[in-house]
């Protein structure tokens, strides 16, 4: 069977797509997956190694842009649909799956015009504009939260969770393994702000270092800064003598999760899914400019379930971050309870369940 996965732009859309692609190719020998994305999206870099083929279309974003930029984006939309149509006619997929991001729109519309089977996946609790529109073109809709079903036609909507790549599933440790990892007073903090970093989180972390002097001998820090802040943040850690591993970007995020006791991060749906399957407590700092405040809504849901703490971006500074980190450092029982709570929402079979539904959609074995 051949499948097109359309979308990307950010890790939040791309990485669930990669997880589905892995499950699809493992499902049956000879299965093929083609990604449709954009040249400026994260997929252009991540897929450059040839793991899965990528074809690009010239679609541009609409939200958060000036009126002139929106006009140009709308003007190029027919060409994007036409190019997506040509790609689909060439690849001849059995199903096209949109995973969010503006590249998924033209691909799903083109699949509709060509009468190819169509499905979408929505990672966030509140769906974005693209998937709200694509619900009318889709025959199957996969969502990550039960509450999200209210935004879509219920007969064709299924709660699958957000897929995570298979390497994350291997890091699902038992309670005994977590206890063995947490020996003595050693405490590892993993800080990241998404694939491009987050300047607000970087600055707050640097400000918080003064408050960590008392636990410096037992504190280890792993920090993904993004490219822009890498040099400055590195100098701050070195100047204060902290045991810190600093990188602009970590290719092997799994090992970072495995080594961590507590995570400081944004609240994108893919990040939450990774935290859940890995069973890691987190301090969530929702990105304040996310469309429809979906990161804030994601974080609020997790806090309600006891699976995380939250600091709003406008309230984030060195003292507020340090206070929450030090609380978890001094209350390991609370850290364990938070890990257990977030683990309960993890859906390690999400990618396989989506593949099952796609097989059923095209009439293959489920």
Image (spheres, rainbow, N blue to C red):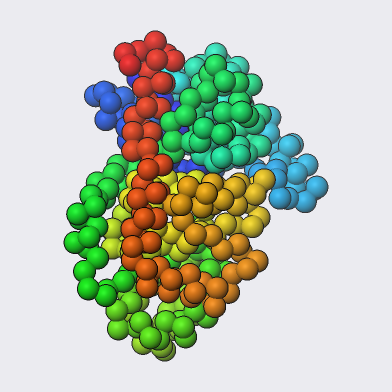
**Viewer-closest of 22 and 296:** 296
Note whether 53 is above or below 198 in the view shown.
Answer: above
Residue at the image position 78 percent from the left and 42 percent from the top? 71
Quadrant containing the N terminus in the rendered view: top left
Quadrant for residue 101, please give it. top right
Residue at the image position 61 percent from the left and 28 percent from the top? 150
Residue at the image position 56 percent from the left and 63 percent from the top? 311
Quadrant containing the C terminus in the rendered view: top left
Residue 194 in the figure: left or right of residue 129: left
Residue 195 visible to an observer of this rendering: no
Question: Residue 333 placed where, x, y %?
Answer: 33, 62
Note whether 355 is above or below 113 in the view shown.
Answer: below
Question: Residue 313 placed where, x, y %?
Answer: 61, 64
Residue 288 in the figure: left or right of residue 95: right
**Viewer-closest of 68 and 214:** 214
Residue 290 in the figure: left or right of residue 70: left
Question: Residue 6 placed where, x, y %?
Answer: 50, 33
Most extreme residue toward the top, as rendered? 363
Most extreme residue toward the right, as rendered? 67
Residue at the image position 45 percent from the left and 49 percent from the top? 272
**Viewer-closest of 318 and 291:** 318
Note whether 82 is above or below 342 in the view shown.
Answer: above
State how many labels appear.
Answer: 0
Question: Residue 362 placed where, x, y %?
Answer: 42, 14
Residue 303 visible to an observer of this rendering: yes
């Amino acid at each position: 069977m051949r499948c097109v996965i359309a979308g990307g732009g950010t890790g939040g859309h791309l990485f669930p797509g990669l997880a589905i692609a892995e499950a699809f190719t493992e499902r049956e020998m000879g299965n093929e997956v083609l990604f449709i994305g954009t040249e400026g999206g994260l997929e252009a870099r991540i897929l450059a190694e040839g793991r899965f083929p990528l074809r690009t279309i010239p679609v541009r974003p609409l939200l958060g842009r000036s009126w002139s930029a929106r006009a140009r984006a709308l003007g190029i939309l027919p060409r994007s649909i036409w190019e997506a149509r040509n790609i689909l006619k060439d690849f001849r997929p059995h199903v096209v799956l949109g995973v969010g991001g503006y590249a998924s729109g033209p691909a799903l519309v083109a699949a509709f015009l060509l009468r190819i089977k169509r499905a979408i996946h929505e990672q966030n609790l509140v769906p974005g504009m693209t998937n709200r529109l694509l619900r009318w073109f889709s025959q199957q809709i996969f969502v990550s939260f039960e509450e999200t079903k209210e935004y879509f036609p219920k007969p064709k909507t299924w709660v699958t969770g957000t897929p995570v790549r298979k390497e994350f599933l291997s890091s699902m440790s038992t309670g005994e393994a977590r206890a063995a990892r947490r020996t003595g007073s050693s405490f590892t903090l993993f800080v990241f702000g998404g694939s491009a970093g987050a300047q607000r989180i970087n600055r707050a972390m640097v400000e918080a270092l003064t408050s960590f002097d008392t636990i410096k001998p037992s504190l280890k820090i792993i920090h993904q800064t993004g490219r822009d802040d890498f040099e400055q943040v590195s100098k701050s850690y070195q100047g204060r003598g902290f045991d810190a591993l600093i990188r602009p970007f970590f290719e092997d995020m799994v090992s970072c999760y495995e080594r961590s006791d507590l995570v400081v991060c944004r609240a994108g749906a893919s990040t939450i899914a990774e935290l859940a399957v890995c069973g890691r407590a987190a301090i969530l700092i929702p990105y304040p400019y996310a469309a429809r405040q979906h990161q804030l809504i994601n974080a609020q849901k997790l806090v309600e379930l006891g699976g995380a703490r939250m600091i709003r971006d406008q309230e984030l500074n060195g003292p507020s971050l340090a206070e929450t980190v030090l609380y978890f450092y001094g209350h390991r029982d609370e850290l364990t309870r938070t890990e257990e709570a977030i683990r309960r929402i993890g859906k390690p079979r999400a990618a396989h369940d989506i593949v099952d539904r796609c097989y059923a959609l095209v009439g293959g074995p489920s």
